[in-house]
Image (spheres, rainbow, N blue to C red):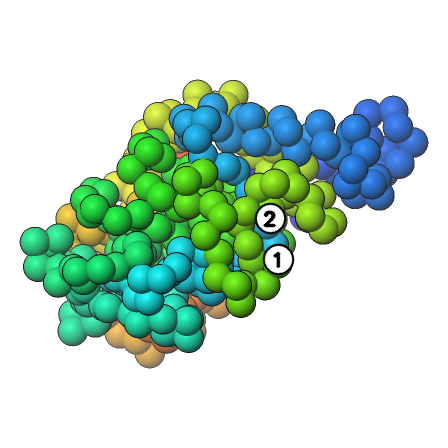
Amino acid sequence: MSRCYNFCAGPASLPEPVLETARDDMLEWHGKGLSLMEMSHRSPEVVGVTEHAEQTLRELLGIPADYAVLFLQGGASTQFAAVPLNLLGDKGGADYVNTGQWSKKAIAEGKRYGKVNVVASSEDTNFATIPPQESWQLGKDAAYLHYTPNETIGGVEYFWTPEVDVPLVADMSSTILSRPINVADFGVIYAGAQKNIGPAGLTLAIVRRDLLGRASAHCPTMLDWNVAAENESMYNTPPTFAIYLADLVFSWLKQLGGLPAMEAINRRKAQKLYAAIDGSSFYANPVELASRSLMNVPFTLADESLDKLFLQESEAAGLLNLKGHRSVGGMRASLYNAVSEEAVDALIAFMQDFEQRKA
C-alpha cells in the first residue's frame, strides 16, 4: 500500500527522505553492528549526533552563541510549568496573552506558581483574532511575557513579534522551523517536536544564557534549564532516537534551502487551501485574514450533517486526520513542513469534488 497524505496536527508527517534513512539505519547504524537507539547516550556516536543536531539547528535559526539549546522531554506542556519555575524569581507574577486553547493551558499552569496577568484575550471572538498589542494591559512588574505564536487548534498565527521590556517567552510548538525568526527577540523559545522537528518524545528549548540559574528552590531538577545546560542535555538519558530523527529533519531542511525556502513552500500551500475555501460557499474559515495560520487551517462545511461523510470519503481517498479538534469541531488540515504541495493539491481536488456532489 502506498503512503497516504497525513494532515494530522501532531504527531505529524515526517519527510519521506528522513523516514527512508531511518529505515535503512534501523537495525545497524554506520557499521557499528547495532542500532543507534541501542547505544549509550554518552557514546561518541550519540554525542556526535546530538552535537550535529544542535549545530545544524543553530545554522537554520541563526541562534546566537549566548543562547543555550536544550533537548528535553515531557512535551511543551511540561514547559508550561518550567517557565514560571525558572523565571518568576522574586517578581511573583508574569504576563500572558490568551489566544487559544494552548494559551489557556499555559495560563492555568502558570497560576500554580505565581500571579498571572492576562494582558489580552481573544476568547470573546472564539479565538478567531489576535488582539493588537496597543490594546494589551501589561503588568508593571512582570518577570516575563508568555504567548503562543501559533494556536494549533484555532488556526491563528502571529506574523509580528511583541515588543516588551521583559523576557519574551514563546511556545512555538506548531510554527518553529516553518519560516525564519529572529531568535534574539526572545528570552525563551520552547517547542514540542511532533509537528516540525521530529517524533513525539522530544522537546526543544532555546534559552538566553543570562536567564539560566534563576530557578526557584522548589523547581524539580529535571525542569531546571541550568541543570540541562550544564549537562549538555544529558543530566539523565535523553530521547536519543528522537534526537537522531530531529538531526535528519534539520539536515533535510538545510538541503532544501533552509527556512526562507521552507517559508516560500509553506505560503504557497496555505494560500492554495485558503483560496479554495474562500472561493466556495460550501466551506468557511473563521479566522481573521491577517491572522490565518500557515500551519493549521480549520474549516467548516455549510451543512455540518455532512461532516461524518466528508471524513469517511476523505480517508478512503488517502487524506488522513482531517477531523477538527474536539473542542471546536469541523475540519482541520495541518500543513506542516513535511506535508507536500502535492498533498494540498489532492485535498483541494477532493474538497471541490465533494462540494460538487453534495452542495
Residue 203 locus on image (x, y percent): 55, 50
Front tag of 2 and 1:
2
Is residue 107 found left or right of 218 in the rendered image? left
Image coords of residue 178 (percent x, y): 39, 38
Residue 99 position (above or below residue 49): below
Corner quadrant of residue 186: top left
Tell me if I can see residue 86 in this picture: yes
160 displayed left or right of 222? left
User: Is residue 179 or residue 68 the one in the foreground?
Assistant: 68
Residue 128 percent coordinates (x, y): 20, 63
Q: Nearer the viewer, residue 74 or 33?
A: 74
Q: Are marks 2 and 1 in contact (CB under 8 Å)?
A: yes
Q: Estimate how packed mark 1 is, as few (under 14), some (14 to 19) or many (20 or more) residues with alpha carbons within 10 Å.
A: some
Q: Mark 1 is on which residue type?
A: Met
- Which numbered circle lies on residue 227? 2
Q: Residue at x 42, y 75 (%)?
A: 112
Residue furthest to the right in view is 33
Pick the front one: 87 or 338:
87
List x then y, in percent, for residue 31. 87, 24
Q: Earlier in the sequence, mark 2 or mark 1?
A: 1
Please give the name of the residue rendered at 13% of the width and 53% of the height, measured from the top-left corner: 133
Q: Which mark is residue 52?
A: none
Label at residue 222: 1
User: Image quadrant of residue 147?
Assistant: bottom left
Q: Secondary structure at mark 2?
A: helix
Q: Quadrant of the C terminus?
A: bottom left
Query: Viewer-proximal residue, 105 or 237?
Result: 237
Residue under the point 55% across and 26% down: 55
Residue 2, image quadrant? top right
Q: Amino acid at mark 2?
A: Val
What crowding class fits label 2: few (fewer than 14 Cα within 10 Å), some (14-19), or many (20 or more)? some
Disc 2 to disc 1, C-alpha distance: 8 Å
